[in-house]
C-alpha cells in the first residue's frame, strides 16, 4: 500500500502527529492540514486521495463541509470522521453526508489505523469486483450498477450513501443468502469488531426506508431470526 495517499484534516497537533506517525508506519503517504480551508484546498488541488480522515470542528471550513465536497467529486474516496462530538445525531449527520466511518474522541490510534487499512482494502476489493462485473445486477425491480455506483428501484434512482450502496451491492451479489451482522461487518465494512453490530442495524433500517414500500414490514431485506439478513425478490415481483 506504499502508493496509497491519505489526507488528515485535524487541528489538534498531537493527534495529527500520532496519526501521521502510525499511518506512515503502515507505508502510507500521509499529508496533513491543520485548518478546514487548507484541507479543502488539498482535497481539490492535490488529489487524488485514497482516504480522508476528517475532524469535524476545524478553523474555517468544518469537516462536514469537506466531506460533502469530497462526495461531490467524481472519484470515490473512503472517509473517516473523527470528532469530540460523539452524539448519535452527529454520527448520523456524518453518515448522511457520505462518511464511511465515524470515531468519537478520545479514540484508540491503533483502532483508527486498523479502520483506515480496512477501508483501503475494501475500496480496492470493490473496485476489482466492479471491473469484473459485466453490468448492473437486478433483483425484483431493483437495479444496482457497480461501475456507475448507482441503484434504481422501478427506474427511480435511489439516493444512497457510499456505505448503503456497498451494503446493497453486497446483498445483490448474494441474493437469497443469509448473513449475520458480524459477517456483514467483515465483508462490507472490512472489520469485524464486536460491539459494532448496531452499525449494521442502522444501515439495514436506512436501506429499508429507501427500498421498501412499508419499512415496518420489509419484503426485500428480510430478517431471518437468529441468523441475520438476506435480500430476496418480493412476492409478485419479476425475478
Image (spheres, rainbow, N blue to C red):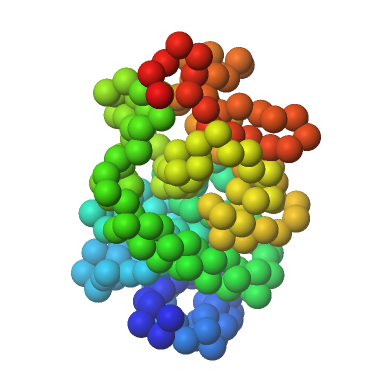
Pick the front one: 54 or 144: 144
Q: Residue at x 32, y 51 (%)?
A: 133
Looking at the rendering, which quadrant does residue 39 occupy?
Answer: bottom left
Return the residue found at the far top: 236
| Furthest residue in direction right, as rendered | 226
In depth, the one of 10 and 50 nearer the eye is 50
Judged from this view, the residue extending furthest toward the front is 239
Figure quadrant of the N terminus: bottom left
Expressed as whole percent of the image width and height from the top left, the position of residue 45 reads: 21, 69
Residue 98, position as x, y percentages in the image: 42, 47
Observer-nearest of 211 and 129: 129
Splitting the image into 4 quarters, where does residue 46 fall?
A: bottom left
Quadrant location of the C terminus in the rendered image: top left
Residue 36 vs 18, above or below: the answer is above
Q: Residue at left 69%, top 30%?
A: 224
Location of residue 31 in the rendering, given as x and y in whole percent from the top left corner: 39, 79
The part of the image, by quadrant, that contains residue 36 is bottom left
How many numbered tags mark residues here? 0
Residue at image coords 64%, 43%: 179
Amino acid at each position: 500500500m506504499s502508493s496509497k495517499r491519505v489526507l488528515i484534516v485535524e487541528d489538534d497537533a498531537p493527534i495529527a502527529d500520532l496519526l501521521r506517525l502510525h499511518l506512515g508506519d503502515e507505508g502510507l503517504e500521509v499529508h496533513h492540514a491543520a485548518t478546514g480551508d487548507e484541507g479543502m484546498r488539498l482535497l481539490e488541488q492535490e488529489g487524488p486521495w485514497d482516504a480522508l480522515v476528517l475532524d469535524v470542528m476545524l478553523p474555517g471550513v468544518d469537516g462536514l463541509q469537506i466531506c460533502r465536497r469530497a462526495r461531490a467529486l467524481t472519484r470515490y474516496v473512503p472517509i473517516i470522521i473523527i470528532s469530540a462530538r460523539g452524539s448519535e445525531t452527529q454520527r448520523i449527520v456524518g453518515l448522511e453526508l457520505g462518511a464511511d466511518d465515524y470515531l468519537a474522541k478520545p479514540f484508540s490510534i491503533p483502532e483508527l489505523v486498523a479502520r483506515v487499512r480496512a477501508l483501503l482494502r475494501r475500496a480496492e476489493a470493490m473496485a476489482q469486483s466492479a471491473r469484473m462485473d459485466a453490468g448492473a445486477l437486478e433483483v425484483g425491480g431493483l437495479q444496482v450498477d457497480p461501475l456507475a455506483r448507482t441503484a434504481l428501484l422501478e427506474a427511480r434512482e435511489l439516493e444512497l450513501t457510499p456505505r448503503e450502496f456497498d451494503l446493497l451491492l453486497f446483498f445483490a451479489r448474494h441474493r437469497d443468502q443469509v448473513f449475520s451482522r458480524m459477517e456483514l461487518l467483515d465483508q462490507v465494512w472490512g472489520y469485524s469488531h464486536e460491539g459494532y453490530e448496531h452499525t449494521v442495524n442502522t444501515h439495514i433500517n436506512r436501506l429499508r426506508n429507501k427500498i421498501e414500500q412499508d419499512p415496518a414490514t420489509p419484503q426485500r431485506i428480510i430478517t431471518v431470526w437468529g441468523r441475520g439478513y438476506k435480500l430476496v425478490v418480493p412476492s409478485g415481483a419479476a425475478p
